[in-house]
Amino acid sequence: MMQAILRTAFPLPAGRARPFTWPWQDRAGRFSALRAVVFALLMLPAAWVAGEVALGLLGPEPWKAALKEIGLWTIRLLLVTLAVTPLGKILAEPRILALRRLLGLTTLAYAVLHLVLYAGHENFGLWKVASEIVRRIYLTIGFVALLGLAALGWTSTDGWIRALGPRWKRLHSLAFPIAALGVLHFYMQSKTVVWEAVMAAGFLAWLLAWRALPAGWRGRLPVLVMLAPFTVLAAALIEYAWYAAATNLPAERILLANLDVSFGLRPAVWAGVAALAVPLLAGAWRLRQK
């Protein structure tokens, strides 16, 4: 019944139709255990926040708390989506690459939910929401990123891939500037408590650096190892730039603190540790394959 309704509402081009598939099905409509597990994991944060709302665990401002939590998961899922292509190609695993659309559309759903929760926090006063988006630069940046994600989600179908041809890849490369806007929005929301925003910036720097590598180098373990210190440096410099431009805190001391591990690892270093995990995972995967 549902498939019939969807096919009627959104007809596919004649001669090219393929059956509607649920998120837990592959392109041929067969059940996929991998996709089912991934989809369940993607829904878990939203379900967790919904449960906290139902149990009254989000404090005196539940809309604001839920808004913040869903916003965090939006930027996390956006970075995970961008990491699918590097991970799938480094591991030479097409099943990972096949998850890109599922992850991307779920990220868009979280971004839309983030906006809906903001409207709820403003008592669904749409004029107030619109005026705040225009007036506050960090909201403007976030809304532009949402519009970009919506454009990418709308054009993610097979029909649009065929219609746009080579232009489709150029259009969807906008995912990286959209992610940069998302990280900037994250920084501006975080104010001075930016440890996770620093890590997000480091992850994005790694993704951009990997993309900039010559195609033949992208799977080489020594090159992937060298991306780890680059990630640390990039995250530390972005953190320095943020504190220097947006706060009165001593940015130079914060930058130098990234080299001091006596009080534990700083976020920039943790971003490098995560980057180092990529070649370690790739090496272990290749040994297993052999």
Image (cartoon, grey):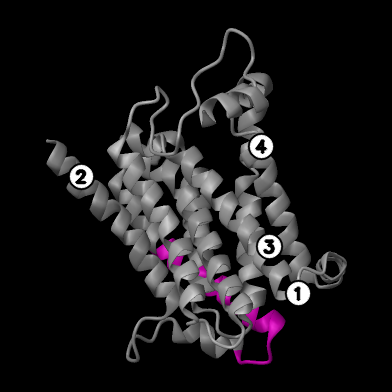
Question: Which callout, 4 or 2, points to the residue nearer the camera?
Answer: 4
Which sits earlier in the primary sequence, circle 3 or circle 4?
3
Q: Name the residue under label 3.
A: 115
Q: Is residue 193 left or right of residue 83?
A: right
Structural distance between the alpha carbons of marks 1 and 2: 49 Å
Which sits earlier in the primary sequence, circle 4 or circle 2?
4
Question: Which callout, 4 or 1, points to the residue nearer the camera?
Answer: 1
Q: Name the residue under label 4.
A: 154
Spot occupied by residue 263 in the image (x, y as percentages of width and height): 35, 91
Mark 1 lies on a secondary structure that is loop
- Choose between 289 and 157: the one closer to the eye: 157
Question: Which callout, 1 or 2, points to the residue nearer the camera?
Answer: 1
Which sits earlier in the primary sequence, circle 4 or circle 1?
1
Structural distance between the alpha carbons of marks 3 and 4: 18 Å
Q: What residue type is labelled 1?
A: Glu
Packing grade of label 2 (10 A; few <14, some 14-19, many >=20) is: some
Residue 123 magenta-highlighted: no
The numbered disc on residue 285 is 2
Structural distance between the alpha carbons of marks 4 and 2: 35 Å
Which sits earlier in the primary sequence, circle 3 or circle 2?
3
Q: Is residue 59 visible?
A: yes
- Choose between 181 and 118: the one closer to the eye: 118
Q: Residue at position x 53%, y 71% from top?
A: 69
Mark 3 lies on a secondary structure that is helix
Residue 239 magenta-highlighted: yes
Q: In this view, does 80 lie above or below 238?
A: above
Q: Residue at position x 29%, y 59% from top?
A: 277
